[in-house]
Image (spheres, rainbow, N blue to C red):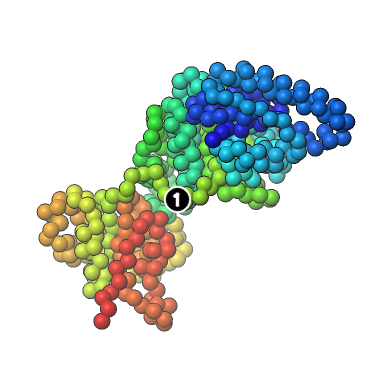
Amino acid sequence: MSIICATDFSPFARHAEDAAAALAGRLGQELWLMHVQEPEVELMSPASQTQVQAMLQDRLTTIAARLQPMAKKGIKVAVKQGRAATVVRDFARGHDAQLIVIGSAGHGASALMKLGGTSERLASGSDIPVMVVREGESFRDWAEGKPFRALLGLEEGEASASALRWLTRLRAGGPLDVVVGRVYYAGDAHQHYGVASRRYSYTDPDPAVETLIERDLKRMVPSLPGEGELFYRAKLGMGRVADHLLELAEAERCQLIVVGSHKHTGFSRMWSVSSATLHLARMAVAIIPPDGKGVGALAPTPRLKRVLVATDFSDVGNAAVPWAYTMVESMGEVILAHVTPTEGVAGQLADLYAPALPAPHASPRVEAEVAARLRVLTPGTAAERGIVTRTEVLRSADPAKALLAMAEQLGVDAIIIASHGRSGVARAVRGSVAEAVLRGSSRPVLVVRPPQA
């Protein structure tokens, strides 16, 4: 395994050289230093080409000697010809490279539509992680054991999971503080978690929402191997995600931003979070492509400490309740939930025209009556296993949406719901709450089927 550092001998390339050497030393990998001559060199005479190549080889050898104390393992050099981004990428593939490091001044002052520098072209099409370095001092300090801090922009999906796995390998090289961050938008977050905005503001952070987001980030990344602290941060967004990631990185004094890439090309790169972050950042950025290992988290085997089970009090609906108590571990918690229909025309209009508002609880009288019916369904063995039962009685014209918001707000480990097994016209007219929950949930869902006659 190796690290490839492409240099053009500029001051920013020197930063990349230092960073690559520090990384190679810390991770115990071989370092390749390479320079790519543009195709126009072919216009020179063969004698001139040989002379220039020898000169470039000598310069790379001199740099390798300077870096050797940091790199520790051997450093090899190579001079190639062609278009830099393509040549570096192909060279890395042929040498089992785990990372490509390149220097760049950044392009923050230029329009995003002008994406196209060598570093950005290399990162956008690479199936190998690419790190673009702005300064090398932080990496040199890290090589000497001094603190280093990275921001991980975390979302659902394989891209972020791959970035998390890559960052874990980097953390194995030495002490590394990690800030796990997520950008959220007020309206979407209030609807997702079923939390009412007290200020109805799209510009002020909502502490209630940010507490829930940071809780979920901690659930996704409860710990990481290696030395260093873990921090969890939610950042209110009002524009591009990349802009807010950069604000968060600046506020947290991070020397590196790590983001997953969907490998956008062409015009779609202008809407890519990773491309915009790379274009605008003043600190190092690592762009991590999907590694083919899926979305499996680095968390330990999931445990069902808290589950949500919904019933409509039919025989089929009630049949789901015992499953919740069977699946939850001892000393866990079961949330028994029921959604009552929206009351009156005003309530139905609110559901239609203000879907972002959370599903309110039923009136106190109805809630007390329904909660009593729910508690009757609690099996006698629950108390013996130390399982706590909690009831939630919601009011909504859309039961699935209400249950999903409740699941996110409470941070349950799984949802259990029964399916009536409707099909054809009955399903089209009455809909399927179980199917809507299954489609919309980001959490595991167990659908209990009615017994066959």
Q: Is residue 386 left or right of residue 241?
A: left
Q: Is residue 250 left or right of residue 66?
A: left
Q: Amino acid at mark 1?
A: Val
Looking at the rendering, in which quadrant would you find the C terminus? bottom left
From the top left corner, tell me how far across and down residue 351 is, in percent.
Answer: 42, 64
Q: Is residue 187 left or right of residue 68?
A: left
The residue drawn where x is 40% and y is 66% is 436
277 versus 295 height, above or below: above
What secondary structure is found at the residue carrying circle 1?
loop
The residue drawn where x is 37% and y is 55% is 443
Q: Residues within 10 Å of mark 1 (few under 14, many from 20)?
A: some
Residue to which mark 1 is pinned: 295
219 versus 282 height, above or below: below
Is any atom of residue 103 visible in this view? no
From the top left corner, tell me how far across and down residue 282 is, in percent.
Answer: 60, 30
The residue drawn where x is 32% and y is 69% is 341
From the top left corner, tell me how far across and down residue 159 is, in percent.
Answer: 51, 47
Q: Nearer the viewer, residue 221 or 165?
A: 165
The residue drawn where x is 40% and y is 34% is 231
Q: Nearer the viewer, residue 372 or 266?
A: 266
Res 120 → quadrant: top right
Is any atom of residue 411 visible in this view? yes
387 versus 422 height, above or below: above
Q: Nearer the viewer, residue 291 or 334?
A: 291
Looking at the rendering, in which quadrant would you find the N terminus? top right
